[in-house]
Structures are given as structure tokens and as C-alpha cells.
Amino acid sequence: MRLTNQRLIMLIFFLQPIAFGAWLPRIPDVQQRLGLGPAELAIALLGMPVGILMTLPFAGRLVARIGGRATILYGFVVFLALVWLPTWATSIEQLFVTLAIVGAALTTLELGLNVEADAIEKHSGQLIMSTCHGFWSLGIMTGTLVGVGFAALQMAPEWAVPITAAVMLPVSVYVATKLPLLQSAEAKGGDAASSRRKLPSLALLGVCFFVFGITMTEGAVADWSAVFLRDVFGLSSASAGFGYSIFAFMVATGRFAGDRLKASYGPVAVARACGVASICGLLLVVSSPAAWAALAGFAAMGFGVSVGFPLAVTAAADQTDRPAAASVAILSFIALLGFLLGPPLIGLIAEYSDMRFGLGVLVPFLVTSLLLTGRLKPAVRTAAADAERAASRA
């Protein structure tokens, strides 16, 4: 049975984070092996966002030049060949550097995925962006469950993650070869060079800062949920890993419903409802009297942040002042500052107070995202802009 282009890109979104997800539940094991405190772990975790932010300016140009399909195909090979490196780190310095390397590979691959999904969405006329990210969440949930399973079997992370990556490599590359060769507007256009000299528009910056609190929360839960459940409630590594699995499951649930909700109620109303849910969930986590309450809070947070990034990707790619790849790269650059600021900020606060107060620092950022949901309102296009875009896709 031949999969449609829409189903193919959804499958690739599912496959991409599985190996990375297998790493997340093992962070406390690596922390313990290296003897790192919360602040030291926070500094080490800075490696990934540093690698991401250093790579994004070049990744946007690369994707605009070679296209999303080629980026995905080669990106899988590079990413899966490197994702296991942090598990073999023997010092905080090595952990920082290896995470930076993984971050550089990860951001290029994910940018290719988002640009390709936007191109397929525009060519087909069918809303798929939120569903694609739903499959990504399902993939990272699957990966965390794989990591939890290896932890339950007492397999060391330095073997568990490489095995997962080795299994995923041939499958991911094979599926990527089935993607269509879509010639994007920016490949035909010729304005990519001039767009790099333009400052981001206020509309694009509003979208970027809306998603800042969303991605900060996603990164914080990925890096700290297992540590939070272990330190606050004394759960084992295997049990603590379920915190992020539940969060990712609810992110996937929200994203699978996101395209239908967007079509029915519009992006602004959906983003506002989810924003309220994320804030309520975070407040429940930081005030939870027992582990089950914290898990319920992580579930509410997951649903709350679920549609934020896919809505922002579509809104950014819809801007008419630069190619879609360039707009999405700018969005990713600013949004991923959340991943840069979140882990060390939470770790430093936890070092001098506790993990509850550390996670509580996310509240004002989520409130800011809620206040900026109006920036997701679809832009009013001019007839000239529509004609230009239609001609570029002809």
C-alpha cells in the first residue's frame, strides 16, 4: 500500500524523535554517574541549546538551498550517528560538548521536517501541521517508553541509546527516500539572499515570542520531569520516566485534535484555551502533594502546550516578507532560546531552593504566551501576494 505524501511526512515526524526520547529518562542516571548537582547538570544541559542556536542561522540557508527532503534524508544519517554520544560522557565538559553536537544535528533535521510539512500542506491544501507534530509527540513518547524499558532491564544508557539509534537508522532513511520531490517557492524565488538582510517583521516577532514560553516549558519538562519526580517523591529512574511519557502522550493527543480544532474555532481561540490549561497544570505540578497529582499536572501541561509550536510554525511560514524556510528558522532561533534559558534557570533556582520553586519559574513565561495568542490570527493577504505565491508554486 502506497502512503500519501501527508501520511509519509507524518510517519517521519513519528520516527525522528524515538532515539532522542530514549535518552531523556536516562538523564538522572548520567547525572548520578558523573556526580552532578542540579546547577552542574543545568550547565551541562546548556550544550544542546547552544548547539542549536549556533547552527540555526546556517541551517535555514541550507534547507532553503537543498530543500526539506534532502535535509531529512541526510539529517537522519547524521543525527542517528551522533545521538548516543552524551551517554558516553565521562565529565561535565564532555556532556556539554556532546549535547551541543547532537543539538546541531537535531535542529537541522527538525527544520527540514517543518519546511517539508509546510510545503506538503500548501501543495495539498489539507491542514496537517498540528497532526504532524502530534506524531512527533507520539514518537518521543515511544522513545521515552523504550528508555524506561531499558532502565527497567538495568541496561546502561551508554548501550541502550546506541541500540535504539541503530535500529531506527535504516527504517528512517528508507521512509525518507519515499518523500516527494517538491520544488519550494524559495528554491524558485531568488529572494533568499535579500531576505537574510531584512530584520524580522513585528508580526513574525510576535509569533516567535508567543512560542517562547511554550518551548521553554517543553524543554523544561523534558530535562527536569524525571529529576523532579525522583527528588521530590523518591521515584526510581524507571518510574520517574513516566512523567515525561504522560506529558508527551497528552501533547500528542492535543496535536492530533489540533487541525480539527483550528478549522472549527480558529488558531487564537484554540491557543488561548490551551494556554489556560498549561498554566493550571503547572500550578498543580508545583503544589502537588503526591506523585499522582504531579503526573496529572504534567498531563494538563502537555495538552496545554500541544498546539503552540505547530500553530506558530504555520503562522511564521505564512509570512510574505521572506521564504518559508527563513521565517521558520527565525521562529526556531527565538523560540529555542526557551531551551537555552529554561534548563539552567530552573537548575540554578533548584540548587538554592527546591525543584518545586524551580519549575514554578515557568509561570510568567506561560502567562506571556497566553497574552500573545492574538499574534496567531491569520494575516490578511493582498491579491498581489496571493498571485505571487501561486505563480511560484506553478
Image: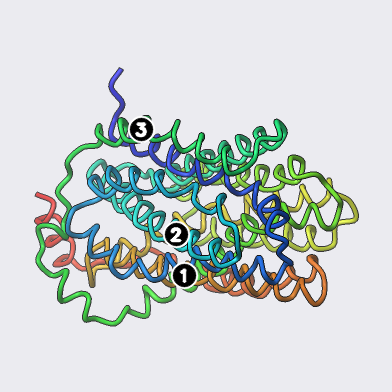
Residue 44 vs residue 89, the one in the foreground: 89
**Residue that mark 1 sits on:** 50
Question: Is 249 rendered above or below residue 57?
Answer: above
The quadrant of the image that shows the N terminus is top left
Q: Position of residue 205 (x, y in %)?
A: 40, 76
Choose top left, top right, bottom left or bottom right for residue 327. Answer: bottom left
Q: How crowded is mark 2: few (under 14 residues within 10 Å), some or many (20 or more)?
A: many
Closer to the camera in the image, 222 or 272: 222
In the rendered structure, are the residues bearing label 2 and label 1 in contact, judged by CB atoms less than 8 Å apart? yes
> Image point 41% across, 44% down: which residue?
80
Q: Earlier in the sequence, mark 3 or mark 2?
A: 3
- Residue matched to label 3: 7
Q: Are marks 3 and 1 in contact (CB under 8 Å)?
A: no
At mark 1, the secondary structure is: helix
Cα distance between the residues tagged 2 and 1: 8 Å
Check disc 2 and report its element: helix, strand or loop: helix
Residue type at numbered disc 3: Arg
Determine the residue positioned at 25% across, 66% down: 381
Q: Which amino acid does label 1 sit on?
A: Val
Task: Give residue 183's position: percent from left, percent from top.
Answer: 14, 49
**How far apart are the two marked residues, 3 and 2, measured between alpha carbons?**
27 Å
> In this picture, is 11 found above or below 265?
above
Tell which residue pokes out farthest to the front in this image.
90
Q: What residue type is labelled 2?
A: Gly
Disc 2 designates what residue?
Answer: 103
Location of residue 65 by image quarter = bottom left
